[in-house]
Amino acid sequence: MGMSEILVVEDDPDINNLLRAVMERAGHRAMQAFSGSEALLRLGASTPDLVLLDLMLPGLAGSELLEHMRGEQGLDVPVIVVSAKAGLADKVALLATGADDYIVKPFEPDEVAARVEAVLRRSGSGGCARVGEVLRHRGLVLDAGTRSVSLDGVEVALTAHEFDILRTLMEEPGRVFSRERLYELVWKGGYYGEDNAVNVHVSNIRKKLAAVDAEGEYIKTIWGVGFKLA
């Protein structure tokens, strides 16, 4: 994988410098921000390939910054939260807001590097999408080459995980995918009962599609089994 630009948002200088060093050892270019406000300014000037985001930041909290990115700024740049908050409720809330992954402090540098590479691959930097592949279902159009989605001609901004879930369902429209199988295919790892992660991302996809077509159903829940394209 080529060099990517990573924005490290962390107020602790030691942790920020450690994350920068981890990214540079992995062959990426790292920018640093030590507050939410500074990160906002950097994001306004240029868009990185990925953001490593702490939550407990001075000025503008990490959760508020994420909401601003996904809302007002409309940025779909991948975000990995790196936080000491280890509760399930915290993780689910951040995933619902638009985070792509969540790493709990204290962390192992190798784990951070591996998760960054995995998210970059899913977001398109790894070249896993077949160029030119376009999937269509009713008014829904998914372009795997540009990793873009539109509904009735209106662009729908999805996060990396949301895009891959929708793509998986659209590639086999008649198949019912269990939550376990979706997790394994999208997160590229073992499944450990992570129903909430899948449920939250499917819910987010539905909300974004409903903003364009409030009456349409595009993902159907098969109770006790999983999900399929509607």
Image: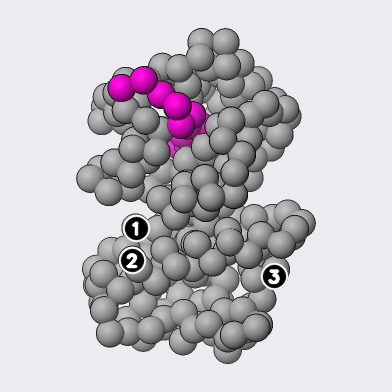
* Residue 140 position by quadrant: bottom left
Q: State which mark lies toward you, 3 or 1.
A: 3
Secondary-structure class at tag 3: helix
- Disc marking residue 208: 2
- Disc marking residue 181: 3
Secondary-structure class at tag 1: loop
Crowding around mark 2 (Cα neighbors within 10 Å: few <14, some 14 to 19, many 20+) is some
Measure the C-alpha gap from mark 3 to mark 1. Answer: 24 Å
Instruction: Tell me the amino acid under the disc marked 2.
Output: Lys
Q: Which residue is mark 1?
A: 157
Range of residues picked out in magenta: 49-59
Q: Is residue 228 visible?
A: no
- Foreground residue among 97 and 115: 97
- Foreground residue among 21 and 131: 21
Point 58% across, 21% down: residue: 19
Instruction: Tell me the amino acid under the disc marked 3.
Output: Arg
Point 61% across, 39% down: residue: 86
Secondary-structure class at tag 2: helix
Measure the C-alpha gap from mark 1 to mark 2. Answer: 8 Å
